[in-house]
Image (tube, helix red, strand yellow):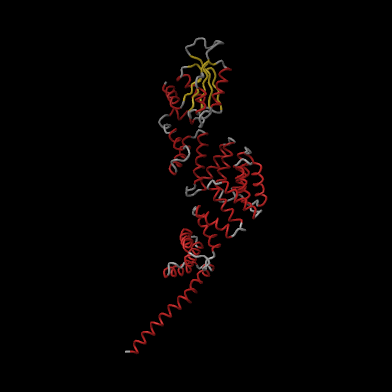
Amino acid sequence: MGTIIIIIILVVVVVFLAVLIFKTVLSPKKIEAVPRLIKQGKTQNAIKIAKQLIAKDQKNYLAHYYLGKAYIKENRTELAVIEYKNVNDNALFGEGINELTFRSEYSQLLLKYNQQNEALKNFLLLTKLDPRNAENFYQVGRIYEQQNRYDLALGFMQKCAMIDKKHAKAHAEIGLMLYRTKQFNEAKKEIDMAIRLSPETYTSYYYLGKILKDAKDLQGAIKAFEKAQRDPELKQKAIIEHGSCYMIAGRTDNALVDFQRAIELDKDNSQQETLYARYFLAACYEKSRKIDKAIEQWEAIYKRNKTFRDVSAKLSEYKDLQANDYLKDYLTCSNEEFPYICKNAVIKGLGLQVLTCDQKKWGCQITGVNKSDESWMAVRKQVVFIRFYRDPEPVEEQQIHESLDEMKSLNSVKSFLFSSSGFNTAAKRFAENRPVELIEKQKLEALLSKAGDK
């Protein structure tokens, strides 16, 4: 009996020693194999071993770290960020995990998933852990800039450029921030330096284009945005900006091509920039009187974002087009047809005899007299001055000034200004107590219907 007890005790001791040997000798060897497997590209094996180690000990943060690294290697970053967060929240650095390396990797993951505040914390720590690394200061500056904290952003960008005088992106960002504060000469110098330092860094051309565009140098801006399109991350933005330059220059056909290209780049229709491309494309269609196509774009925007700019108002403004063919013709007919529609409205709707009818870039200008006045052919006749606007933007005060000046030159006693897009507040205020009547879309629609039904 005593012999059996001794044997049992020996078995227990052997098992205990075996477990101890496994934990102290074999287990460390197992964890050491993981980074080697990752380096060899055998990520599935690495993941399997790391998971086994974690299953035995949830607080094995070195295993969590290597599991995250394996996920990164397999481009499964959504899983990697979970493992890295666990390490960040619990691990004691120095126990097999180098804090500098870890934070550099973790920061990039956080940026990928737009966790700006957490990324900022890590990059700020990196500026202290590795103060001679200019890239960390650059990333802090970028995050502050995206959060509209420009003073802080500029300080970190300047520190980056001080550490690394050849950091082209930092010079470009400094240039853009100086530009925002209207320090135009200094801004241009920084952008030019960025391009000299790295002609292949196409983000610099994007910022140069923005500066030139606002300086009204559209040709220079167009060339800069063409080069900026070589940057894959900025390509869509650069194409949209390129198109907007053509839009400002009145070259609508060129702008249309750019905005359509920008939309086609977004295969999933998920990018925020695509909304801007559609919005500007709709504006081009509206300007070109292709209202149905403009409505298609506004509806596509509204489906994704009901509060985007004035899209809801635009859809509301044009919702009655299908119900009113007269208004639709007014808005969508060619420039050649438009004067005939306006002339018909004056004759049949206002009951006036037309004296002159002139096509204008903003619409049509007509003078007329009352049909009942038998002396309308006489030298001294009571001329009525009429303008029809169909631009997509509300009529401004300056256009009321122009109308009144022209009225004086024609000895006109009264004027009617019709606008399908209304009049801005300044225009309405200026027109008060003056011989000019501002007529907005609802009454214009009634006039067109009256003329068409006769």
| Quadrant position of the C terminus in the picture | top left
Report the side of 56 relative to 145 (left or right): left
243 and 401: which one is in front? 401
Question: How many tags in the picture?
Answer: 0
Look at 66% across and 42% down and name the residue there. 185
Give x and y (percent) for residue 197. 67, 52
> Which quadrant does the N terminus fall into?
bottom left
Query: Camera-side residue: 408 or 376?
Result: 408
**Eyeballing the image, is 351 above or below 314?**
above
Residue 17 position, x and y percent, is 43, 80
* Residue 126 position within the rendered picture, expressed as x and y whole percent measured from the top left: 56, 58
| Residue occupying image coordinates x 54% and y 67% | 39
Q: Position of residue 334 (x, y in %)?
A: 52, 30
Q: Residue furthest left?
A: 1
